């Protein structure tokens, strides 16, 4: 499917991902055969309207689907976890194209089939996620410091012990504290000498790591912030905390699920700048899920447009915005109001999004499409390249597309 | 970044931070609690009755051999309040009403602590399991809870206590068996609601284990209604317990408010109001105090008004 050189540039590849939801009226094909790559260090924008399956796609990277009623009906999400570059130890050199990190194994792993224990190791460490509403994504009963600590305790206990100048083979309650595997009675053991001092050292080391992570997101006075509870912070500050937590372990892939939707516009711009700056410095790949075209155009290297559980068009931001090929993409762009749009003349795509319960074998956009032909109602167009990096799933560009196997392996439940 | 060694780090700084945060929380809740006058009344009443229970042996000399048995002064039966040595009067059998009132607070405290403490733990565990595991486990546990809830509390407790035989310990057991279902229900509803929150997903996203997510994200956010219910039950349990004692499911002669009301009620018609009134008043005050505080606590612990 992919040649070796191209594969080595992808941090993750999604192939024919299908996520279904069991509902009372039938099986909802929320994500129905989605394939795309996320390349090393790029920002891929995933655009689409509400309910098109973009969030579900993003969440499937972390296997964060409600099961039941969610069903992973098929597909592969392969991911190549990276580690610090062996040559330069993370400083950046020619060998690792100045990123300071390198794929740790040649063999990508399938995120959908690995054990939950392995999944846990990847979550927060190699793949991180920022949520839409930072007000809801922070535990109201924990301080920012305690909350930020979790990620280090979970993935960086070795570094923690080292910073606290404790031997790496420390065992017992102290070790369990550093690795966050508390056992009944550990709290008591750590309250009294001789373990009390070690516990305090770990806490200082932990606070240090948290402060450093928070400082990266340019929050004023990170030390003071650690004692705060989420409700005492503004939305922008909370999102900065979320970003700090997400990027704390220097992940290879960051999934940003509409991270600025809940924020007001001025804060939004600063948060975007921050994500952009951190990403460029660390060469993290970002999957940016959004419904805001102008925003995606501003920050993404490539764009994938989703419609009704499918990717209908994917390409570099320049290509897609300068030369949109799919009628849906064109409709979306026409719908963006500009300064020249007359009052009361907002463009819209006619019709509504189709039901995704047991969809027929036809183009999902048929019925709303101004260029609809008979072929569109009988066959399902595949995503095929039109030029270089630009692919589109439409019969306009691929008149022969009807001969392409109409929507492979449909699962029928 | 420098290495942390024994010499260069400030232990007090660490301790202070955690301590300060905890104190801030505690005083925040306390402040909101005390800003409500009715809650303050409840708190004062509870404080007084707790003091009564704690200092009972110093207020009136303990009866021997069993302090929870009413002392009998056969030389002074049916004395009205104000009688020297028996300033709240005596019962038909020469029991000192004042002694009963004071030591009855101990019995009541025992009753409510044992019942509420055990049911809270059992209910929380069962409710959490049902909410977290879901599926048929939830189904089975909740149908059992339904069976328990389908019988009125008092009648059910009465039946169990009657089967077990008349004793104060059996009243505790009977009440615990009846009340745990409430906590299981509350906890299950809480867990199901809280586990859908984004912050639980966020904890999963950073790779937290299930146990950690339960202990740090779900449980602390779920306990508020359980705490409130427990406070209310501290009062209600005494009310039901007194009812059971009143109809004779407790040992006769025990220093318990319900038993005393029962002993005294025969004399009310003949004008000896005191033997029933004072213990009855205590039951009323006890239930009132915990209900007032429970209501106040509900408001004070509401995370939505936190920080206002």
Image (tube, coloured by chain):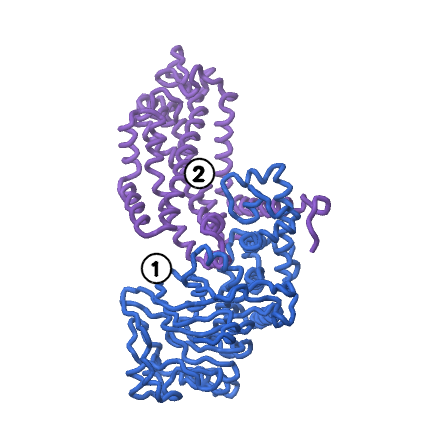
Q: Is residue A155 above or below residue A271?
A: above
Q: Chain of mark 1?
A: A
Q: Chain of mark 2?
A: B
Q: Is residue B153 above or below residue B28?
A: above
For residue B183, which quarter of the picture? Answer: top left
Q: Is residue A142 above or below residue B162?
A: below
* A372 to the left or right of A39: left
Which disc is residue A172 wearing?
none
Name the residue: 50% across, 76% down: A6
Quadrant placement of the C terminus of chain A: bottom left
Kindly report the distance in space between the C-alpha atoms of the residues bearing marks 1 and 2: 42 Å
Label 1–label 2 contact, CB within 8 A: no
**Which chain is tinted blue?**
A
* A110 to the left or right of A73: right
Q: Position of residue A155 (x, y in %)?
A: 55, 55
Q: Position of residue A274 (x, y in %)?
A: 60, 69
Which disc is residue A68 wearing?
1
Q: Position of residue A223 (x, y in %)?
A: 65, 55
Front of the two marks 1 and 2:
1
Task: Confirm whether residue B80 shows in the render.
Answer: no
Task: Confirm whether residue B228 shows in the render.
Answer: yes
**Residue nearer the viewer, B237 or A221:** A221
Mark 2: secondary structure: helix
Q: Position of residue A162 (x, y in %)?
A: 64, 51
* Crowd band around label 2 with a 10 angstrom C-alpha radius: few (<14), some (14–19), many (20+): many
**Residue nearer the viewer, B79 or A364:** A364
Mark 1: secondary structure: loop
Which disc is residue B290 wearing?
2
**Residue nearer the viewer, A278 or B92:** A278
* Crowd band around label 1 with a 10 angstrom C-alpha radius: few (<14), some (14–19), many (20+): few
**Which chain is tinted purple?**
B
Name the residue: 36% across, 30% down: B172
């Amino acid at each position: 499917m992919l040649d070796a050189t191209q594969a080595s540039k992808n941090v993750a590849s999604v192939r024919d991902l299908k996520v279904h939801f069991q509902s009372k009226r039938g099986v909802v094909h929320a994500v129905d055969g989605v394939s795309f790559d996320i390349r090393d260090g790029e920002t891929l924008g995933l655009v689409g309207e509400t309910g098109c399956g973009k969030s579900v796609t993003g969440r499937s990277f972390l296997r964060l689907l409600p099961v039941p009623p969610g069903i992973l009906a098929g597909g592969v999400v392969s991911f190549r976890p990276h580690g610090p570059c062996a040559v330069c130890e993370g400083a950046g050199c020619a060998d690792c194209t100045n990123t300071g990190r390198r794929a740790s194994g040649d063999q990508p792993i399938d995120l959908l089939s690995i054990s939950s224990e392995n999944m846990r190791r990847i979550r927060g460490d190699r793949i991180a996620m920022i949520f839409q509403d930072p007000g809801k994504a922070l535990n109201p009963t924990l301080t920012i410091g305690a909350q930020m600590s979790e990620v280090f305790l979970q993935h960086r206990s070795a570094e923690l012990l080292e910073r606290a100048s404790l031997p790496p083979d420390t065992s017992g309650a102290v070790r369990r504290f550093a690795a966050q595997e508390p056992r009944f009675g550990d709290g008591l053991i750590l309250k009294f000498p001789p373990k009390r001092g070690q516990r305090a050292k770990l806490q200082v080391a932990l606070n240090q790591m948290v402060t450093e992570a928070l400082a990266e997101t340019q929050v004023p006075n990170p030390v003071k912030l650690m004692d705060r509870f989420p409700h005492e912070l503004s939305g922008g500050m909370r999102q900065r905390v979320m970003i700090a937590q997400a990027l704390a372990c220097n992940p290879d892939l960051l999934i940003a699920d509409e991270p600025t939707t809940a924020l007001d516009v001025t804060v939004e711009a600063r948060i975007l700048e921050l994500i952009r700056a951190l990403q460029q410095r660390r060469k993290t790949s970002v999957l940016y899920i959004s419904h805001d075209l102008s925003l995606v155009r501003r920050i993404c290297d490539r764009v994938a447009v989703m419609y009704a559980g499918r990717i209908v068009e994917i390409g570099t931001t320049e290509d897609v915005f300068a030369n949109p090929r799919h009628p849906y993409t064109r409709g979306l762009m026409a719908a963006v109001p500009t300064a020249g749009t007359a009052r009361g003349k907002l463009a819209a795509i006619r019709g509504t999004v189709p039901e995704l319960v047991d969809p027929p074998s036809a183009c999902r956009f048929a019925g709303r499409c101004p260029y609809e032909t008979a072929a569109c109602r009988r066959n399902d167009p595949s995503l095929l390249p039109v030029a270089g990096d630009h692919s589109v799933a439409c019969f306009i560009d691929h008149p022969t597309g009807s001969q392409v196997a109409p929507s492979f392996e449909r699962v029928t439940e | 970044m420098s290495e942390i060694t024994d010499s260069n780090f400030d232990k007090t700084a660490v301790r202070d931070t955690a301590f300060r945060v905890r104190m801030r929380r505690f005083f925040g809740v306390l402040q909101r609690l005390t800003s409500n006058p009715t809650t303050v009344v409840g708190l004062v009443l509870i404080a007084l009755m707790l003091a009564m229970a704690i200092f009972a042996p110093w207020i009136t000399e303990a009866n021997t051999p069993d302090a929870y048995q009413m002392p009998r002064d056969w030389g002074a039966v049916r004395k009205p309040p104000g009688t020297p040595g028996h300033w709240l009067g005596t019962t038909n059998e020469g029991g000192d009403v004042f002694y009963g009132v004071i030591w009855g607070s101990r019995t009541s405290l025992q009753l409510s602590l044992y019942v509420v403490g055990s049911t809270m733990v059992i209910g929380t565990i069962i409710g959490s399991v049902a909410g977290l595991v879901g599926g048929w486990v939830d189904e089975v546990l909740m149908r059992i809870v339904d069976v328990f809830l389908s019988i009125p509390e008092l009648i059910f407790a009465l039946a169990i206590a009657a089967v077990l035989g008349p004793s104060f310990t059996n009243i505790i057991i009977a009440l615990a068996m009846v009340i745990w279902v409430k906590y299981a229900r509350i906890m299950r509803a809480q867990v199901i609601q809280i586990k859908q929150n984004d912050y639980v997903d966020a904890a999963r996203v950073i790779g937290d284990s299930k146990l950690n997510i339960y202990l740090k994200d779900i449980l602390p956010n779920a306990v508020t209604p359980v705490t409130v219910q427990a406070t209310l039950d501290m009062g209600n349990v005494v009310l039901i317990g007194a009812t059971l004692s009143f109809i004779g499911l407790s040992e006769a002669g025990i220093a318990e408010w319900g038993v005393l009301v029962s002993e005294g009620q025969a004399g009310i018609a003949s004008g000896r109001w005191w033997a029933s009134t004072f213990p009855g008043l205590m039951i009323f005050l006890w239930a009132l105090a915990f209900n007032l505080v429970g209501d106040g606590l509900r408001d004070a612990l509401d995370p939505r008004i936190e920080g206002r």
